[in-house]
Amino acid sequence: MRTTSAVCICRTHDYADLRQDLALCGLYRDAATALGRTIDDATPTRQGSTDMGNVSHLVPTIHPTIGYDCGDTIMHNPEFTRYGITAHADRADRAVLDGGLAMAWTAIGLATDEAHRTDLLTRLAARTRR
């Protein structure tokens, strides 16, 4: 099988700013809301750095977050882990499952709605013409 793929390796900023696709974020917000999740802010923001920012400069991207009540712990530390795998594992598991399902519904919504798909391809083409 032959493809028309090409690889370009070039040095850029280590972590570019994250550019979330607002239309895709809207699909995700609708999916998460349908699961009973409350979305705090209609405009997605991302704090911190991520290499996904680099990807978001090339293709329409979302980087949603989903949470659960984890008491007075903070993310990315041992107490947060312990909290999520002990007495409150059901909450943590529900967050993981809801997040995955919301992402799947986002992809299904994009794949099955011609208007969303056409708009996405238009936005993608605009990025590649730069």
Image (tube, rainbow, N blue to C red):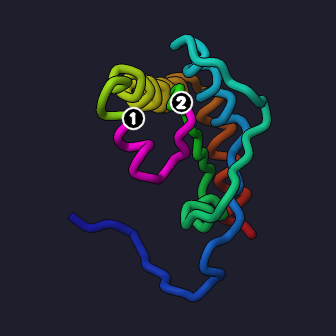
How crowded pointer 2 is (Cα within 10 Å; few <14, some 14-19, many 20+) is rated as: few
Tell me the residue that label 2 is attached to. Answer: 71
Figure check: 12 above or below 99? below
Rendered location of residue 84, percent (x, y): 37, 34
Rendered location of residue 126, percent (x, y): 73, 57
Q: CA distance from mark 1 to mark 2?
A: 8 Å
Tell me the residue that label 1 is attached to. Answer: 83
Q: In what element is the residue under mark 1? A: helix
Figure check: 37 above or below 10? above
Give the magenta-colored segment's residue range: 71-82
Foreground residue among 58 and 103? 103
Rendered location of residue 26, percent (x, y): 68, 29
Examine the image and state in which quarter residue 120 appears: top right
Rendered location of residue 118, percent (x, y): 64, 36
Q: Which residue sits at x=68%, y=24%?
A: 39
Q: Is residue 126 left or right of residue 101?
A: right
Callout 1 amino acid? Tyr
Magenta stretch: residue 74 in it? yes
How crowded pointer 1 is (Cα within 10 Å; few <14, some 14-19, many 20+) is rated as: some
Magenta stretch: residue 122 in it? no
The reply to whether the C-beta atoms of the residues labelled 1 and 2 are less than 8 Å apart is: yes
Callout 2 amino acid? Gly
Quadrant where the N terminus is found in the figure: bottom left
Q: Which residue sits at x=59%, y=26%?
A: 114
Let me know if residue 58 appears in the view.
no
Foreground residue among 56 and 40? 40
